[in-house]
Image (spheres, grey):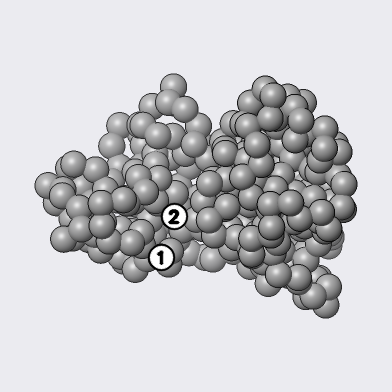
């Protein structure tokens, strides 16, 4: 395995309120950087690996029957602390989330992705030929280390991907609300963060990351970290503004329409904010807890 790596995600603040979702610590083992802040039988330096499958489920416990907390996608870097019984206990570098990935979903840390999938979905072929049986599908945002090209296809680990569906990793899509619109109809999946299935905060995270904006994973984390707070009665909402409930988040497409992945429609759906507020107040998460505005991105940054 590769050499130990240092953390690329800010560690939780010292004190009694470490977020267990973001803290690689359990009674028998913890990150060496947490020495003196948590109790554990031993402390270790993590080893960097990368997700080598289209999507890998991150579980709360080392069991496929355990609930899905989130997903890591191809090319994602993870810090590995332990491997046992077919599961790796890891922290996802992208957002700091801690949990258990199937050990066979991980590969070496190198090479780093050079491109990522910009289409909602694309296919991995065994040869640069669209008539060949596909080996796998890859979703929006998946990372690829391109090693060469053959006609209209890029050569990547395991086969070939249509080049027109990929963009360099530095390229961004600044209209994150536009990315969300592309995902309308994607089925709702608790813990999902791919174009095959999304939950509310997974939709926001994926869209912001495609715009080049780091984003926490869960709605409560996003509410604390993203943008600037607007007055609770703010009427002049804009495209890209975020609307938060206790346990839910959506994104405005304009002053009146909200897009969100939700369990009522069981998909990514566009609806009037007023209708969503009334239904959610009555049936689920209660009142809106905050409105937040992200800084504008320049269209010139797009590929």
Seen as rendered, the residue at the extreme left is 41
Location of residue 297 with respect to 36 vertically, above or below: below
Location of residue 11 with respect to 141 vertically, above or below: below
Q: Determine the residue positioned at 68% across, 52% down.
A: 232
The residue closer to the viewer here, 258 or 117, is 258
Position in image of residue 111 (x %, y %): 52, 65
Q: Which residue is mark 2?
A: 96
Proximity of marks 1 and 2: CB atoms separated by less than 8 Å: yes
Position in image of residue 290 (x %, y %): 64, 50
Q: What secondary structure is marked by label 1? A: loop
In primary-sequence order, the first of circles 1 and 2 is 1
Position in image of residue 113 (x %, y %): 59, 64
Seen as rendered, the residue at the extreme front is 233
Q: Determine the residue positioned at 36% across, 31% down.
A: 61
Mark 1, other Cα within 10 Å: few <14 / some 14–19 / many ≥20: few
Q: Is residue 165 visible?
A: no
Query: Which of the image's four quarters has the N terminus?
Result: bottom left
Q: Quadrant of residue 215?
A: bottom right
Q: Which residue is mark 1?
A: 10
Q: Is residue 244 visible?
A: yes
Q: Quadrant of residue 37?
A: bottom left
- Left or right: residue 274 versus residue 62 is right
- Left or right: residue 280 versus residue 80 is right
The residue closer to the viewer here, 7 or 264, is 264
Position in image of residue 299 (x %, y %): 83, 73
Location of residue 158 with respect to 272 vertically, above or below: below
The residue closer to the viewer here, 175 or 65, is 175
Query: Which of the image's four quarters has the C terminus?
Result: bottom right
The residue closer to the viewer here, 125 or 263, is 263
Q: What secondary structure is marked by label 2? A: loop
């Amino acid at each position: 395995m590769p050499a130990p790596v240092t953390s690329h995600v800010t560690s939780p603040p010292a004190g009694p309120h470490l977020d267990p979702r973001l803290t690689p610590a359990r009674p028998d083992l913890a990150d060496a950087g947490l020495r003196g802040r948590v109790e554990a039988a031993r402390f270790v330096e993590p080893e960097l690996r990368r997700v080598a499958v289209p999507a890998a489920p991150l579980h709360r416990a080392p069991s496929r029957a355990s609930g899905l907390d989130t997903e890591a996608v191809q090319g994602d870097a993870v810090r590995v602390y332990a491997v046992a019984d077919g599961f790796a206990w890891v922290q996802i570098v992208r957002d700091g989330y801690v949990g258990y990935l199937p050990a066979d979903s991980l590969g070496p840390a190198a090479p780093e992705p050079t491109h990522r999938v910009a289409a909602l979905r694309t296919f991995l072929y065994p040869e640069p030929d669209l008539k060949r049986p596909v080996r796998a599908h890859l979703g929006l945002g998946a990372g690829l280390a391109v090693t060469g090209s053959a006609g209209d296809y890029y050569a990547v680990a395991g086969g070939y991907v249509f080049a027109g569906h990929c963009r360099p990793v530095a390229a961004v899509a600044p209209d994150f609300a536009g990315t969300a619109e592309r995902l309308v109809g994607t089925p709702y999946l608790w813990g999902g963060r791919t174009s095959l299935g999304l939950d509310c905060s997974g939709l926001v995270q994926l869209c912001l990351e495609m715009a080049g904006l780091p984003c926490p994973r869960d709605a409560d984390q996003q509410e604390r970290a993203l943008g600037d707070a607007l007055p609770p009665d703010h009427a002049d909402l804009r495209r890209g503004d975020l609307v938060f409930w206790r346990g839910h988040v959506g994104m405005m497409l304009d002053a009146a329409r909200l897009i969100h992945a939700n369990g009522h429609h069981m998909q990514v759906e566009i609806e009037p904010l007023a209708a969503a507020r009334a239904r959610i107040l009555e049936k689920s998460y209660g009142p809106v807890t905050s409105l937040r505005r992200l800084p504008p991105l320049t269209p010139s940054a797009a590929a």
